[in-house]
Image: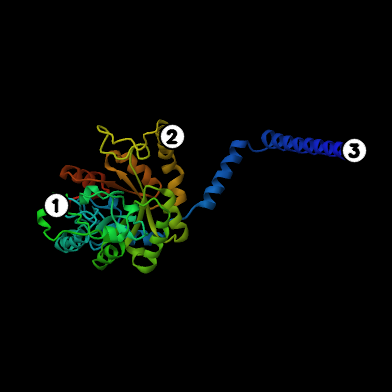
Amino acid sequence: MHRIVELVANSALLWIFLQTTMSVLVTVLYEFCIPWIIWGSLIVVVALKLARVSPPPTGTIQEVLGVNPLLLSKDNSVSENHGNGEQYCMRVVAHRGGGYDYPENSLLAFRNMYFMVHRLNFLQSRGKGCSAVELDLRLTKDNIPIIFHDSTIERLTGQTGTISEMTWEELREFDITYNHPLKNKFSEGEKIALLDDALQECLNSEQRIIIDIKETRLDVVQVVLDAYKKYPKLFQRGVVSSFNPIVVYMIRKKEPRIVSSLAWRPYFFSRASYVGLETLGPVRYRNLFKHLAACILEILYEWLLPSFVYYVVGISVVLLHKDIVNPRVIERWCERGVRVMAWTVNRPSEKVHFSRFLKVTYLTDTLHLEKDM
């Protein structure tokens, strides 16, 4: 009994000592030193510095993205101060390889890019034309990396099935021209492309590549790292992008030489799709509480992205929905050393607006009329 009383007494004395010490420290720090808001800010700054993955060297970014379109002269060509007319400038990116002109995310579309580049070579020297492609990365059930945008196969093949629940053997024979408006033009059809084949096709024709990661499983991190290891030229030609900052951060943490981007659109967390303010897409979650949580996360992330996330991840580009791109947004990102790309720009009048007036790179589903931009 005596030992129990002694233990309780000693515990009380220890608690009093700790509480008194803490009170004294708090009083000293708050009353006689730096306010807590300063201490808190310093802690956050140090944490951000420690967590940050610095962007690649400016030379590497310039090699991948070329001259910043904002530096182009009034006639939309590379000015004397920023190039001799031969320096590369990424003005237009074929979204999914140009899905209106050819089956999206197909080898046929990427191959067509090669001929488009050579056909418009004289325009490319003036900062026009197109020599960059965006493709979407997903993993099959057996972890085979393929080029496919949707999580299901219905829209492109007319069949039913979920990519993550199907093996490559099950997917490889589907015809992705099934619902294409120009289907009659592709009499032999077109199959789903493997990542490896797509990278070879694009790199062999000197195209820049934006790898848009749609896969949610973290296995995709190693897939991307392996691709860069197998094709070192990607360090001078590739950009890794995703809506998910965690995936891009994990990739750059292991390989900081990779040029990266984050994508953003309004209502990303709460809506499954977005076509404009007039017509919001279907809700992503039917559960009310999940939907409310997604809305809150949306507001929070919209503030975090330009405040902290871009800095920690070390992105060089931000891909924004065209409806939210304006001079103030471009200026805001420019102050952070991040270029803006707009997606998806298909109307000729919009192409003129983004190319000549806003002077930003844009992604498009069709390469027709690019010579007039």
Q: Quadrant of residue 108?
A: bottom left
Q: Which residue is mark 2?
A: 293
Foreground label between 2 and 1:
2
Q: Which residue is mark 3?
A: 2
Q: Residue 365, percent across and down?
A: 20, 50
State the separation of the CA atoms marked 2 and 1. Answer: 42 Å
Q: Residue 192, percent across and down?
A: 24, 58
* Secondary-structure class at tag 1: loop
Crowd around label 1: few <14 · some 14–19 · many ≥20 (10 Å): some
Q: Residue 137, percent across and down?
A: 32, 55
Q: Nearer the viewer, residue 56 or 80?
A: 56
Q: Is any part of residue 314 visible from this angle?
A: no
Q: Residue at x 34, y 64 (%)?
A: 234
Crowd around label 3: few <14 · some 14–19 · many ≥20 (10 Å): few
Q: Residue at x 71, y 34 (%)?
A: 27
* Secondary-structure class at tag 2: helix
Mark 1 and mark 3 residues within 8 Å of each other at the beta carbon: no
- Report the side of 208 relative to 303 (left or right): left
Foreground label between 1 and 3:
3
Tag on residue 368? 1
Callout 2 amino acid: Ala
Tag on residue 350? none
